[in-house]
Amino acid sequence: SDPAWRYLNVRRLFNYLEESILLGTQWVVFEPNDDRLWSSIRRNVTAFLTEEWRRGALFGRTAEEAFYVRCDRSNNPQESIDLGQVVCEIGVAPVKPAEFVIFRLSQFSDSTSLVDE
């Protein structure tokens, strides 16, 4: 129902971004789930998305208009930490600046999952 998904190129872009980020964050399952890990995840995902934005894959005059990465205490409460889960929320603007399509990636100590919104 989201109008951004009606374009094939948007879906392909998301498939590429999701797969790349999932593969690029497999290492997190071996690290302590804390502020330092969340900062590393934000830094790595932000670097990747910045490069994609510079290549023209995301809309926006600035990186802040093109995407955001949230991985902190707000989306990693103690219950998630206790379950061995790390959640990273990512918003990207594939069609219009600052109109984000959001997805969440979850890395578990024994698996990985993706939740589109």
Image: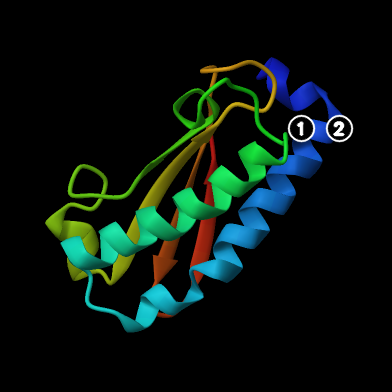
- What's the amino acid at mark 1? Val
Residue at the spot 49% in from the left edge and 53% down from the top edge: 47
**Label 1 SS:** helix
Horizontal arrangement in the rendering, residue 111 relative to residue 95 (left or right): left
Callout 2 secondary element: helix
In terms of image quadrants, where is residue 32?
Answer: bottom left
* Res. 8 mark: 2
The picture places residue 43, in percent across and down from the top left corner, at 38, 56
User: Residue 63: x, y in percent?
Assistant: 50, 32
Q: Which residue shows up at 60% across the image and 69% down it?
A: 23
**In the rendered image, the vertical position of residue 102 relative to residue 110, given as above or below:** above
Drawn side of residue 16 relative to residue 67, left or right: right
Quadrant of the snapshot with the N terminus: top right
Front residue of 49/17: it is 49
Amino acid bearing label 2: Leu
On the image, the x and y values in percent for residue 105 come to 47, 54
Front residue of 80 and 87: 87
Q: Which residue lies most toward the right here? A: 8
Q: Name the residue under label 1.
A: 10
Asked if marks 2 and 1 touch (Cβ < 8 Å), the reply is: yes
Q: Is residue 51 above or below residue 53?
A: below
The residue at 37%/60% (across/down) is 41
Residue 113 on image: x %, y %: 52, 60
Relative to 31, is 25 on the left or the right?
Answer: right
| Image coloring type | rainbow
Q: Mark 1: give few (<14), some (14-19) or many (20+) Cα within 10 Å.
A: some
User: Residue at the location (58% across, 17% down)?
Assistant: 97
* Disc ID at residue 42: none
Marks 2 and 1, how far apart in space? 5 Å
